[in-house]
Image (spheres, rainbow, N blue to C red):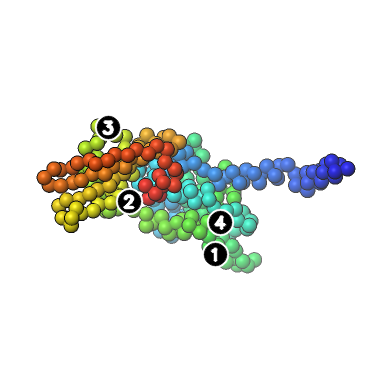
């Protein structure tokens, strides 16, 4: 009896929700799972108003951090309960993601329009429409929405001054251990600098970085070294530690993603 009831239930589900509709729903969910390693570049284009634009390339180490951040927002966004169909005219701002396989993914603010003869359309705060292979899905992500609307304009071109200073210092210290650890040049950081007995010329330094090869591997390795920098003895390494297969969260923190 239970088997018969289950069979009848499944038949009803098949009639009410045809298989192709269920498949489309699954396809829609899969659209928001992207891998940053499959991205070639991203571009913000204004379709109306000013013609300012910007391209973020995976071949640029600093742009790569931005691309990772955006892809993470897409993957952690939530499907919206609103209809995915775009209303009214095209959005004034379009965000393109160019994939290595040639696919093009676009993101644009979602709009809500009211009125019949004269339509008034306004952007829905926190709502994004993603299009891939002519399929659309409406997403909810406040961070992604804010970034597409205005945040991209304030992303630094190249490294900020404080990071440039860190890289300069890291290069000076890294030269001492470069022979044994030549691959650890990714996302260099000066984790701490402390004066020795208050002397402005003598410092205890802790520095770290990821291995560049980890860029194409499942995970990064991380090196952490401690040194003393004084006028009389120069750079003296006290300790070198290597941590293999660091977590994604730790690598993101290292690179400020």
SS at badge 1: strand
The answer for how far apart the CA atoms under marks 3 and 1 are is 58 Å
Quick check: marks 1 and 4 in contact, CB under 8 Å? no
Quick check: marks 1 and 2 in contact, CB under 8 Å? no
Quick check: marks 2 and 4 in contact, CB under 8 Å? no
Number of numbered labels in the structure image: 4
For label 1, the residue is 122
Label 3 environment density (alpha carbons within 10 Å; few <14, some 14–19, many ≥20):
few
**Front position among marks 3 and 1:** 3
Of the image marks 3 and 1, the number of the one nearer the N terminus? 1
For label 4, the residue is 140
SS at badge 4: strand
Residue 232 seen in this snapshot: yes
**Whole-percent x, y for residue 232 in the image:** 11, 45
For label 3, the residue is 180
Q: Along the horizontal axis of the image, is 13 left or right of 51?
A: right
The answer for how far apart the CA atoms under marks 1 and 4 are is 16 Å
The answer for how far apart the CA atoms under marks 1 and 2 are is 31 Å
Of the image marks 1 and 4, the number of the one nearer the N terminus? 1
Taking depth in this image into account, of 77 and 168 the one nearest to the observer is 168
Q: Which mark is residue 157?
A: 2
Quadrant into which the N terminus falls: top right
SS at badge 2: loop
Classify 232 as above or below 80: above
Quick check: marks 2 and 3 in contact, CB under 8 Å? no
Q: Residue at x 39, y 49 (%)?
A: 253
**Whole-percent x, y for residue 231 in the image:** 12, 47
Taking depth in this image into account, of 80 and 217 the one nearest to the observer is 217
Label 2 environment density (alpha carbons within 10 Å; few <14, some 14–19, many ≥20):
few
């Amino acid at each position: 009896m239970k088997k018969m009831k289950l069979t009848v239930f499944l038949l009803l589900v098949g009639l009410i929700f045809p298989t192709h509709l269920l498949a489309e729903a699954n396809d829609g969910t899969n659209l928001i799972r992207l891998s940053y390693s499959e991205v070639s570049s991203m571009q913000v284009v204004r379709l109306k108003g000013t013609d300012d634009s910007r391209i973020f390339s995976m071949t640029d180490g600093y742009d790569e951090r931005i691309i990772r951040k955006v892809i993470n927002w897409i993957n952690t966004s939530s499907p919206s309960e609103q209809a995915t169909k775009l209303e009214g005219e095209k959005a004034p701002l379009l965000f393109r993601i160019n994939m290595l396989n040639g696919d093009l993914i676009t993101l644009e603010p979602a709009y809500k329009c009211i009125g019949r003869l004269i339509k008034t359309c306004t952007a829905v705060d926190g709502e994004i429409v993603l299009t891939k292979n002519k399929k659309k899905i409406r997403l909810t992500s406040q961070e992604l929405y804010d970034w597409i609307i205005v945040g991209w304009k304030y992303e630094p071109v190249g490294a900020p001054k404080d990071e440039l200073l860190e890289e300069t210092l890291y290069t000076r210290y890294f030269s001492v251990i470069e022979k044994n650890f030549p691959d650890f040049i990714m996302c260099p950081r000066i984790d701490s600098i402390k004066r020795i007995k208050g002397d402005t010329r003598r410092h205890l330094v802790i520095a770290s970085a990821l291995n560049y090869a980890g860029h194409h591997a499942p995970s990064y390795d991380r090196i952490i070294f401690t040194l003393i920098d004084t006028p009389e003895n120069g750079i003296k390494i006290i300790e070198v530690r290597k941590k293999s297969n660091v977590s994604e969260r730790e690598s993101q923190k290292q690179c400020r993603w």
